[in-house]
C-alpha cells in the first residue's frame, strides 16, 4: 500500500527536490511541508527532513530550524510513534530538537567532505531500511562540514546497550565517535543518517543502495 510522506522544507533546504523524486520514484505519495506551518499528523504516514543548510547554518547547524513551527508537529508525530527520517541537515535538526540524542559537530579535519562513503548496517530496523540486513555493506555519498557524531560516554553506552546505532562508517571520514553514520531514537521510530540515500538511486549515480531506505 502506498504511503503518504511529508517532506519538510526550511529556508536553505537544498535536497528537497531530490528527496521528492526519490519518494515518488519508490511508488509513494509525497507532499512538501513548509517550516512556518504546522500540519495535521493524521494526514501523513512518514516524515522526512532533507539535507541542506537550514537558516544558512547560523548559530549551530539545525539549531534555528529545530525551533520553527513545523517542528512542533514533527515532535507530536514522533510521540505518536510514527516514523521520521532525517538526512544530513535533517539529522542535525532532529538532534537539536531533542528527538535524537547527541550532536553533530565540525568534521575532525575541519574541512567540508564531499565524497563516497562505505557503510555497514550495524542493526536491523523497522520502518526505513527494513529490508537491510545486519552487516550488509552500503555505498552512499556524504556532503557535510558538521557531520562528526558526538555524545558523552554514558550516551554512547546507552546507544550501544539499546541497539540504537543503525549505520557505521567502514572508513570514518569525519571523526564520528564509534564510527557512527546513523542512529535511531530510543523509541525506535526516529531515524537519521549523515549520508544521502536520495543521491544513490541508480547505478549511473555511482550506487543504487539508496533504494533500500524506502
Image: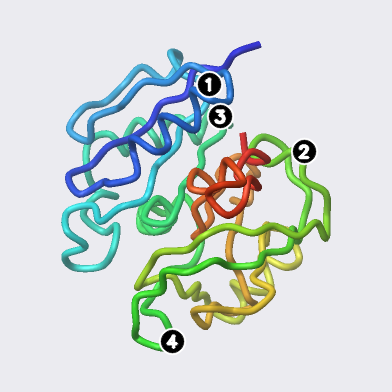
Helix, strand or loop under label 2: loop
Q: Which mark, residue 100?
A: none
**Contact (Cβ within 8 Å) of mark 2 with mark 4:** no
- N-terminal label among 3 and 4: 3
Gap in Å between the C-alphas at discs 3 and 2? 18 Å
Q: Which mark, residue 108?
A: 4
- What quarter of the picture does the C terminus occupy? top right
- N-terminal label among 3 and 2: 3
- N-terminal label among 2 and 1: 1
Residue on which disc 3 sits: 82
x and y, in percent, of residue 84 in the image? 51, 38
Residue on which disc 2 sits: 131
**Contact (Cβ within 8 Å) of mark 1 with mark 3:** yes
x and y, in percent, of residue 148 in the image? 46, 75
- N-terminal label among 1 and 3: 1
Gap in Å between the C-alphas at discs 4 and 1? 37 Å
Residue at image point 41% right, 30% down: 20
Q: Is residue 6 above or below residue 169?
A: above
Residue on which disc 1 sits: 45
Gap in Å between the C-alphas at discs 3 and 4? 34 Å
Gap in Å between the C-alphas at discs 1 and 3? 7 Å
Helix, strand or loop under label 4: loop
Tag 2: Cα neighbours inside 10 Å, few (<14), some, or many (≥20)? some
Amino acid at each position: 500500500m502506498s504511503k503518504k510522506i511529508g517532506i519538510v522544507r526550511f529556508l536553505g533546504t537544498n535536497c528537497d527536490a531530490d528527496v521528492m523524486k526519490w519518494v515518488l520514484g519508490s511508488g509513494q505519495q509525497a507532499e512538501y511541508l513548509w517550516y512556518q506551518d504546522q500540519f495535521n499528523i493524521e494526514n501523513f504516514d512518514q516524515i522526512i527532513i532533507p539535507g541542506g543548510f537550514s537558516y544558512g547554518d547560523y548559530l549551530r547547524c539545525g539549531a534555528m530550524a529545530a525551533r520553527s513551527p513545523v517542528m512542533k508537529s514533527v515532535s507530536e508525530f514522533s510521540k505518536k510513534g510514527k516514523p521520521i527520517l532525517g538526512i544530513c541537515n535533517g539529522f542535525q535538526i532532529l538532534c537539536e530538537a531533542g528527538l535524537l540524542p547527541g550532536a553533530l559537530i565540525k568534521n575532525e579535519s575541519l574541512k567540508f567532505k564531499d565524497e563516497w562513503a562505505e557503510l555497514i548496517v550495524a542493526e536491523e530496523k523497522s520502518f526505513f531500511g527494513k529490508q537491510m540486513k545486519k552487516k550488509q555493506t552500503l555505498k552512499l555519498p556524504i556532503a557535510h562540514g558538521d557531520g562528526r557524531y558526538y555524545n558523552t560516554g554514558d550516551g554512547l553506552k546507552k546507544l550501544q546497550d539499546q541497539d540504537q546505532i543503525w549505520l557505521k562508517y567502514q572508513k570514518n571520514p569525519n571523526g564520528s565517535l564509534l564510527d557512527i553514520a546513523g542512529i535511531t531514537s530510543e523509541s525506535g521510530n526516529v531515524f537519521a543518517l549523515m549520508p544521502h540515500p536520495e543521491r544513490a538511486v541508480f547505478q549511473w549515480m555511482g550506487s543504487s543502495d539508496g533504494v533500500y531506505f524506502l
